[in-house]
Image (cartoon, grey):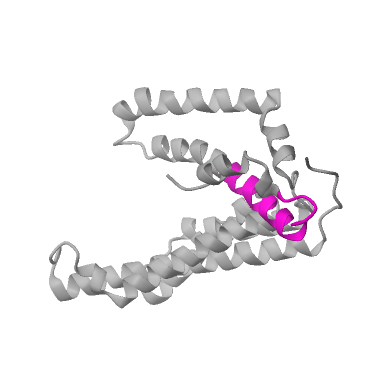
Amino acid sequence: MSTPHDAEPTWYKYVGITLALTSGLFIGSSFIFKKRGLLDTKAKHGELGDGHAYLKSPMWWTGMILMALGEVLNFVAYAFSPAILVTPLGAISVVISAILSEIFLKERLNFTGKVGCAQCIIGAVIIVLHAPESNGSDTIPEFFGYVTAPSFIMYAVLCGAGIAYLVYIIAPLHGETNPMVYITTCSLIGSFLVLSCQGLGSSLAYTFSHWNEDNQFLQWPIYPLMRSSRSP
């Protein structure tokens, strides 16, 4: 049974910010390495090569490794900072990718793209300045107390209905012509994945600092939560 616990240290927030920004740097850079690898493969082997020629490209593998590291850091960031802070900072990867693509791939960013990058940076600064200091929950019972609240259940039902409507009604009609159909679907599904990562990451961080007093691995719901935190 979980017991009341002390508030999280202030430095947790800054660790989470650092991890989230580093994650954005790695993920944003990974796209450049992977595309450079694909372009080099195309130049060397033709349009398609043997279908898997890019797997021999060190550049492509460097990009994959950077992306994997970035995703790991992003997950760990949820253990230290609220999802409302970590998730929007993921947009920094878009800015990094846009800047590096102009430098290394010679892809010109138009005025609209530059405005979008500026908005991402301004938004990230505002979020960092005004985000809460700590997570809403640290233990598994606290987390499930929130997700079983009537307000969240209503949200989950509405999201589920919206996802079903988009997938089975809208996507067959407009999916190939309107990218917002799939973007919206992924965003709705992603909201649950972010929530799972937040709950799992926070409970793991709490467990490591309270291993003997309040080990969250003794709470059975952590195991289905670990499964749901994995990307499909």
- Residue 205, given in percent of the width and then of the height, sits at 70, 57
Magenta-tinted stretch: 194-215
In the image, residue 207 lies in the stretch drawn in magenta: yes
Residue at 14% from the left image edge and 72% from the top image edge: 45
Residue 101 horizontal/vertical position (percent): 41, 69
Which residue is found at the position 60% from the left and 51% from the top? 87
> Is residue 199 one of those drawn in magenta?
yes
Q: Residue at x 55, y 46 (%)?
A: 226
Q: Where residue 47 sits in the image (x, y, percent)?
A: 15, 64
Looking at the image, residue 216 sits to the left or right of residue 197; the answer is: right
194 to the left or right of 141: left
Name the residue nearer the viewer: 216 or 127: 216
In the rendered image, the quadrant that contains the N terminus is top right
Does 109 sit above or below residue 193? below
Q: Is residue 61 at all visible to an observer of this figure?
A: yes
How many badges with numbers are in the image?
A: 0
